[in-house]
């Protein structure tokens, strides 16, 4: 960033170099706009918080290279108390990506098109200038100095922090989801193509757990929980230990935890996030684009960013900064499905006892591989699944 006297001007400044901000900056720089993308972390490996599991289609949809992939999976396992279902396909069905490599790839794409990338700079505030453009203040805590830039449009891609647009709705409408994850190396060979989820009280009550393979002897293990749904506090580290010791049966000298990370998401369950405030546009987790049922936010954030990019591009070209259509389209996109995902998450993670969760998992085990993938990743509930949910009708509609 330049010194105050020669403050740089941009068409778009994007704050947040997560998947949404990265995708937005990538597309806008490809369209020839003068783009600056800024993130407060000085190195993206320092906030490597996401498990980055996704269906295979993510690579094609966003033209992502194989270099961002850690593993391809062709098995999906749902583990409940005393019941387990494994789906197997001859073809790969999904990926576990390297979250750091994915974000670095997006930033490299921005640089290729002469976009500017600044890491280690934190957004502090902005003000509107006489001509309607925005002046933004950033601060670098290592260099202990502030800088200013001017832009036509400012994009808030700061994830759940919503550092620019804020959490302005009634706080009760923001559901909190917390995830803790370890990267584990083992000297035992594990199935590097098995994507595993844990439900039910044996391994985790009021939430879910996972083992995502990264290589033949390396995996990500995690648990996610929702403080609002809890009747009593939980000990996530205990759940991780249970999965490692009891489920995988690994002895202490057979594995090493090489990294611990985690993150918190705040999801507006009423769809009342701020998509536009003057010339500030919100994208990704800022507008709760994540699929709340399973916490899949990378593909949905990138999709939301791609949609917003069309309107930002048009706004710059036409000098018309009305983003109502973007908001309408983004909201319509998942309106009903979002509501079902929220209801289901409250039901499964907050209301059902262990026996009913096992019953539910037994019921969904009747779905074929593609149907269960559609439920988990597409918010698409096939007929059979609707029948299963109806069997819980009483509890479901009291939520
Ligand atoms: C533990 C965990 C596991 C997950 N696993 C998966 C998974 O397997 N698959 C999946 O699809 N999704 C997963 N998700 C969700 C997914 O990671 C998020 O939905 C996704 O990263 C959202 O992308 P984003 O770009 O909107 O925001 P983020 O990825 O949160 O990026 C926001 C960026 O903004 C920066 N920032 C914030 N404030 C400022 C500021 N003031 N100044 C400058 N920079 C700022 C942050 O440093 C950050 O880099 C997981 C989430 C968690 C917490």
Image (cartoon, rainbow, N blue to C red):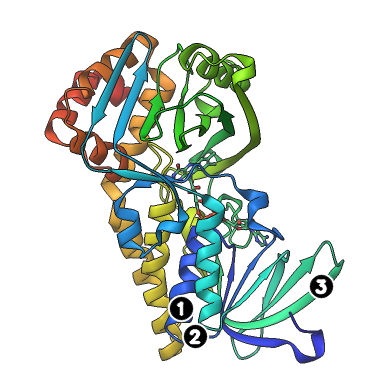
Name the residue at 39% across, 54% down. Answer: 299
Pointer 3: residues within 10 angstroms few (<14), some, or many (20+)?
some
Mark linked to residue 33:
2
Residue position for label 3: 146
Q: Position of residue 12 (x, y in %)?
A: 55, 79
- Distance between the alpha carbons at the discs numbered 2 and 1: 6 Å
Q: Tell me: 16 left or right of 324.
A: right
Name the residue at 49% across, 85% down. Answer: 33
Total marks drawn? 3
Name the residue at 34% across, 55% down. Answer: 58
CB atoms at circles 2 and 3 under 8 Å apart? no
Pointer 2: residues within 10 angstroms few (<14), some, or many (20+)?
some
Residue lying farthest to the right in this orientation: 144
Where on the picture, by quarter, is residue 120? bottom right
Q: Is residue 279 visible?
A: no
Helix, strand or loop at disc 1? helix
In the rendered view, tell whether residue 326 sits above or below residue 293: below
- Distance between the alpha carbons at the discs numbered 1 and 3: 26 Å
Residue position for label 1: 28
Q: Nearer the viewer, mark 2 or mark 3?
A: 2
């Amino acid at each position: 960033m330049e010194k105050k006297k020669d403050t740089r001007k941009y068409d778009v400044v994007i704050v947040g170099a997560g998947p949404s901000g990265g995708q937005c900056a990538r597309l806008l720089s490809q369209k020839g706009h003068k783009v600056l993308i800024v993130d407060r972390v000085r190195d993206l490996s320092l906030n490597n918080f996401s498990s980055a599991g996704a269906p295979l289609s993510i690579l094609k949809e966003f033209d992502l290279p194989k270099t961002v992939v850690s593993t391809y999976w062709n098995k999906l396992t749902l583990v409940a108390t005393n019941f387990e279902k494994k789906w197997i396909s001859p073809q790969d069905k999904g990926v576990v990506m390297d979250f750091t490599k994915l974000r670095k790839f997006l930033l490299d794409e921005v640089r290729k098109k002469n976009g500017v990338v600044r890491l280690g700079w934190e957004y502090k505030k902005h003000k509107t200038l006489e001509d309607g453009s925005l002046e933004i203040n950033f601060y670098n805590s290592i260099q202990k100095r502030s800088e200013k830039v001017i832009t036509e449009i400012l994009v808030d891609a700061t994830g759940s922090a919503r550092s620019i647009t804020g959490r302005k709705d009634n706080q009760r409408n923001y559901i909190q989801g917390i995830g803790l994850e370890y990267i584990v190396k083992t000297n035992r060979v594990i199935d590097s193509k098995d994507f595993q989820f844990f439900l039910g009280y044996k391994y985790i009550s009021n939430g879910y757990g996972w083992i995502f393979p990264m290589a033949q002897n390396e995996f990500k293990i995690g648990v996610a929980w929702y403080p609002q749904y809890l009747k009593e506090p939980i000990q996530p580290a205990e759940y991780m230990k249970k999965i490692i010791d009891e489920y995988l049966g690994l002895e202490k000298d057979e594995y090493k935890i090489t990294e611990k990370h985690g993150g918190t998401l705040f999801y507006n369950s009423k769809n009342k996030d701020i998509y536009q405030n003057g010339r500030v546009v919100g994208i990704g987790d800022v507008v709760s684009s994540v699929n709340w049922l399973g916490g899949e936010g990378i593909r949905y954030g990138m999709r939301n960013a791609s949609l917003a990019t069309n309107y930002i591009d048009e706004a710059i070209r036409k000098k018309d900064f009305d983003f109502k259509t973007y908001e309408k389209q983004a909201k319509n996109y998942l309106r009903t499905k979002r509501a079902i995902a929220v209801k289901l998450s409250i039901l499964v993670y907050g209301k059902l006892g262990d026996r009913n969760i096992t019953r539910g998992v037994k019921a969904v085990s009747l779905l074929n591989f593609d149907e269960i993938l559609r439920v988990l990743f597409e918010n698409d509930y096939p007929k059979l699944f609707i029948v299963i949910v109806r069997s819980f009708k009483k509890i479901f509609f009291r939520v």
